[in-house]
Image (cartoon, grey):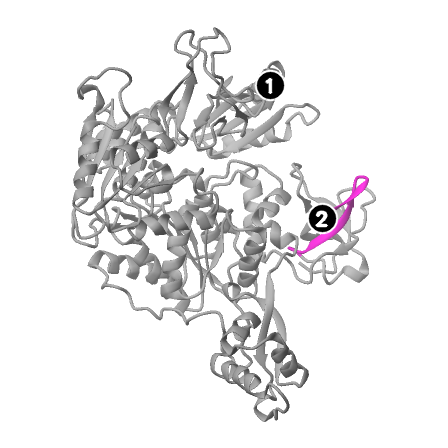
Amino acid sequence: MSPSLPYARIALAIPVPELFDYRVPAELDASVVPGARVRVPFGRGVRIGYCIERSAEQRHEKPKSIEAVVDDAPLLEPDLLQLVRWTADYYLCSVGEVIEAAIPKGVREGKSRTIRWVRRSPTADSFQDRGNGIEGRARLLAILAERGPLPIEELLAAGEVGESAVKTLAKRGAVEIVRAPTREFGGLRDPRGASTSGPVPWVTPPPYRLTPEQRAAVDAIEESLDPPRFRPMVLEGVTGSGKTEVYLHAIKAALDRGRGALVLLPEISLTPQTVDRFKERIGEVAVLHSLLTPVERSMHYGRLRQREVRVAIGARSAIFAPIPDLGLIIVDECHEDSYKQESTPRYHARDLSVVRAAQRGIPVLLGSATPSLETQENIARGRYTVLSLPRRVTGHGRAHVELVDRRAEPKREGPPPMLGPKLILRLREALEDGDQAVLFLNRRGFARRIHCPSCGFQLSCTDCDIALTYHKRDDRSLCHYCGTVRSVPTACPDCSMPGIRRTLPGTEKIEETLTAIFPGVPVGRLDRDTATSGTRMQEILAAFRRGETRILVGTQMVAKGHDIPGVTMVGVIDADVALGMPDFRAAERTAQLLCQVAGRAGRGEKPGRVVIQTRQPDHYALQAAASQDLGLVRRQEATVRRLLKYPPYGFLVRILCEDGDEMRALQTAEGLRHFIDGAGVAAVQPLGPAPAPMAKLRGRHRVHILLKSQDRSALHGVASRVARAKPRWSTTKVIVDVDPTSLM
């Protein structure tokens, strides 16, 4: 669009979908371009907005003028602006809200991290030194000549001199002291053309030859890179089949053609291991995820924008990474629900990866050992090409899985222990053989139920419809949703009976139990209570990888992606915990998760063994996990989902009404249901309103309506009308969630 058009349409980060028209002053005409950040008057104040497009016409009377352009260059490139607009339109939110989610806070605030570097000046070779300290200064110049620019502290340590020596050299013109990012973020460029930031890409040869199946997958990807074309592919490979090696070769192929690559990971816990491996093989990468500080995210983001780095690795928000000449997108563990954002904008990064690839005309690779039913249906309909890795690269078969029926185990007085005799036996055998073990329980804390055995009182969160979890280390009960903290009473508040019980163990209790059963055996724990930062999480995993920890117990953080050859035994403590969830995807998710955690065993030279404790051994999800065959789940689920028009045989929109007043939440939902019925769209079937499975959360009552249809366009049309009809004057918060992955 021509920048001479007199008006600009500006997006603001407010929950209002329309763009706002502003007049462009003559002095700002050249800089108000799509993607630019601007300061505009709005209401009685001033806001920061984003130019989306220029226009010859105004849609509002007497539009105000833009006050200033905030940045020297647009924050959004044209391809990202296109993706942002599509996201806002499909997920029914404002363009400004998507942009604020796409651009890290540190970037918007201009945060950066620099240190002092020292480099030789262009005249250093002809420099003639004199006076006291000449030997120390000569050492500094020799070190810089050999190693290139260095951080000042590193240079002083190497030269064994004080800072005054560097200042003297700088004053005499032999060196320059400049501020530049740390080595982690690119360091300082050497005037001679070299970089101080690390080795050149692909310096380490692959550890082994590609298997025929891997080679075929890489060849198929390369065909889509040259010439580039949109092609969605699913890399379906069993755990340990070498999917990451295929990713690395595909990225190398993209880099060889002068293009960048994006790798999405579902779990932050997978990022350190993957980043280290990618850096070793392809050089520098940018990292984007929520455990980084705003400064760190800003630095990585800036390196991409400045074309210093061409590969980005990150969690779901990295789908908006500004990668130069993007040529390939990879989504690892594409079945994971963590790719779905649970706050506005409620996008699904897996689906956006396909959209972004289609917009750019490039291939997208979706990797998984357990593809979702939606992905399988896209394969069946010919929309996606499947690339198969049916064998582990070690040549070993998959781990042997034992389903242990807890109901059939020997009875004992009192509540049954969480660790059954068969599981303890297998653990002991692994430890005696010098191996490592992983224990999985998807519930953290010490006890998940605090109750009175006499009257039935249960200690629950007053703001959420959930029981509090006891954490022994901190001696407190905690709500895992809102963070409410309460002390545990010594006697029942209702009947005054002493001896409040703490039952239903979590990972903290399992850790304590293992330490008692296996004295002297180092036990580690990986969950949100122990992995309080990215650094702490890396320390826990590194200790386990080095063998310093023999048993690692944890939640989903231990279940996926980790490749630790010493692990030969995996135990699943309560496999039924998710089967009773009020969600139509419960069985599929259970089977996927159990297959993933089972895949941690036997990845080295020794065969693996898995023990799954359950009270429903005949359930098809457990049978599928035992056989490592999700086909059983797909066949069982397909019949029910077709009948009920659930994905992948239909589409869903969830409308959630939240209010501090329970009656008002219900009245709002009923009003919206009346509005939907009045729209008269026969292809869309509304269900509800009804209380959400978690009927109260953070002090707000929750009522929801589910819209189902096999006509995506009709469903989206009704949902769009609901989004525009939200009662903004009410205290009720109305959330319209397109393609929800959680119905809780």
Residue at the disc numbered 1: 665
Above or below residue 607? Residue 683 is above
Q: Secondary structure at mark 1?
A: helix
> Which residue is outermost to the front?
132
Q: Which residues are magenta?
A: 34-49
> Residue 258, how many percent across, how many down?
44, 69
Above or below residue 503? Residue 184 is below
Q: As rendered, which of 519 and 729 lies closer to the eye?
A: 519
Amino acid type, callout 1 = Ala
Confirm whether residue 63 shows in the render: yes
Amino acid type, callout 2 = Ile
Q: Quadrant of residue 506?
A: top left
**Quadrant containing the N terminus in the rendered view:** bottom right
Q: As rendered, which of 367 and 476 lies closer to the eye?
A: 476
Q: Quadrant of residue 25?
A: bottom right
Please rate how many residues cluster around mark 1, counting C-alpha atoms within 10 Å: few if below 14, some from 14 to 19, many from 20.
Answer: many
Sooner in the amino-acid sequence: mark 2 or mark 1: 2
The answer to if 623 sits in the magenta stretch is no
Residue at the disc numbered 2: 48
Confirm whether residue 265 shows in the render: no
Q: For the residues labelled 2 and 1, say whether their Cβ atoms are less than 8 Å apart.
A: no
How many callouts does the rendering have? 2
> Residue 87, how many percent across, how many down?
54, 44
> Residue 294, how many percent across, how many down?
58, 51
Q: Quadrant of residue 113?
A: bottom right
> Which residue is outermost to the right?
62
Magenta stretch prevailing secondary structure: strand
Q: Is residue 743 left or right of residue 567?
A: right
Above or below residue 458? Residue 572 is below
